[in-house]
Image: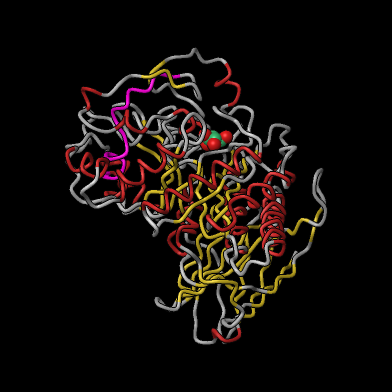
Amino acid sequence: KQAKMIVDKDFIISNIDNRIYGSFIEHLGRAVYEGIYEPGHPLADEQGFRQDVIELVKELNVPLVRYPGGNFVSGYNWEDGVGPKEDRPRRLELAWKTIETNEVGTNEFADWAKKVNSEVNMAVNLGTRGIDAARNLVEYCNHPSGSYWSDLRIKHGYKEPHKFKTWCLGNEMDGPWQIGHKTAEEYGRIACEAAKVMKWVDPTIELVACGSSSRAMKTFADWEATVLDHTYDHVEYISLHTYYGNRDNDTANFVARSLDMDAFIRSVAAICDYVKAKKRSKKTIHLSFDEWNVWYHSHDADSQRDPWQIAPPQLEDVYTFEDAILVGCMLITLLKHSDRVKIACMAQLVNVIAPIMTEKGGGAWKQTIFYPYMHASVYGRGAALNPIVSSPLYDSKDFTDVPYLESTAVYNEEKDELTIFAVNRDLHESLLLECDIRNFQEYRVIEHIVLENDDAKARNTAAARGQVQPHNRGDAGGKDGFVVASLPKFSWNVIRLA
Ligand code: AHR
């Protein structure tokens, strides 16, 4: 099979907002405790943060980390997590039925984020709390000094304000499972009022309103329209969440699921623009895809767990090679919509549906999905180009006209580099890719990285860490404005030119 791509420097979708490569740490399972934080571990630093995990997060070059939830945030009293550790309460955590010790809270997380060179995407509780706790938290985190909450932060040892820029107004408030679940009207009102006072405390912050927790929700679309009707003038973004699985073991259908993500993004952008038109507004609402990933491997194990443990293993999906292929397609989809999607968070980062896993007292290792995420984050900075792509197509159970080739290109003018990201979805045959890179005449291939495996179910585990890892022996080559590459069957490819 053969596919074609025309890449032109002047066909730009958008400059990519680096926050599109964000991630997420929730107080859930072993993400915080035994994940990023394990005092007593041989590699723990003076604050108890694991340095091996810090190094892996740095390898991923994560610009933004959402915190502290997720479902967790809807029952969280942020005051429990600040001040002397010995005074912090242990609480029944109702979202995930565990005991929360509060050893790590806002200030420690801000320290950790600095260590990994990330910004914090902070979330406020609009489930059990409301506008008062939200404005106090902004004051505690972002106000320099001279007020009750900012002076309390200083008393807690943090003289400088954290200056968190991006804030989520609650989490998945449309979901009946959410602590403090609301109708769109109820949420729209509280989100609007919280947004107003949060910005009165710090006018420089940007706010994300909750969209639907998935495209499959019955209230999807009406929810977004109603919430934006209330909040349009007070927020910058609306959120999208999606997780995919392959329970029926139909791989060709599974790796086509990024087409669903694509349709989801288009729909939410259309709803934002509908509200814009209705309000005759000049402002455009952007999208924050602040939870996305594969999630299904751990569902059965999680349904059998006893409640009220401290940091039990939860949502510990061990990812397969085919999961990495879908993750690659999802990253390409986000890039294709980088004019509208300004923030995206792979959910999550450590141990919980995560690219990085840890063993208590032991090592840290990379899941299969680590690799496409790292490649996109490291090489996908600059301008997202809009290539003209033609590819042979296939039909699957839920999708028609699925292109075998999923691809896009990113131009990094500063570094003088062009990167082509390409997935061959064909399970059986390689795909010959011919690229016309016209006004990149002088560019030569410097590397063709490939992630491939004969076994779609191959996994990296604590015992076998290198089952799935990329190599750079891809055959891409060419000159005078043309590049030809053979994309191995069922593979993720990064073709780097300079
Ligand atoms: O990321 C895991 C959970 O998925 C989050 O807590 C919640 O927001 C979503 O349902």
Total labels: the figure holds 0
**Residue 437 placed where, x, y %?**
60, 80
**Residue 294 placed where, x, y %?**
59, 40
**Residue 51 placed where, x, y %?**
26, 41
Residue shown at 68% from the left, 54% from the top: 268
Displayed quadrant of residue 109: top left
Displayed quadrant of residue 293: top right
Specify the farthest residue to the top.
306
Q: Quadrant of the N terminus?
A: bottom right
Judging from the image, the colouring scheme is secondary structure
Q: Ligand 1 lies in which image quarter? A: top right
Q: Is residue 38 magenta?
A: no
Q: Is residue 107 magenta?
A: yes
Q: Does 53 sit above or below residue 383? A: above
Tell whether 332 sits left or right of 419.
Answer: right
**Residue 100 placed where, x, y %?**
37, 23
Q: Is residue 393 visible?
A: yes
Q: Does 220 sit above or below residue 259? A: above
Tell whether 147 sits left or right of 340.
Answer: left
Residue shown at 60% from the left, 44% from the top: 188
Q: Does 444 sit above or below residue 492? A: below
Q: Is residue 356 visible?
A: no
Q: Nearer the viewer, residue 281 or 153?
A: 281
What are the residue bounds of the magenta stretch? 98-111
Q: Nearer the viewer, residue 372 or 22?
A: 22
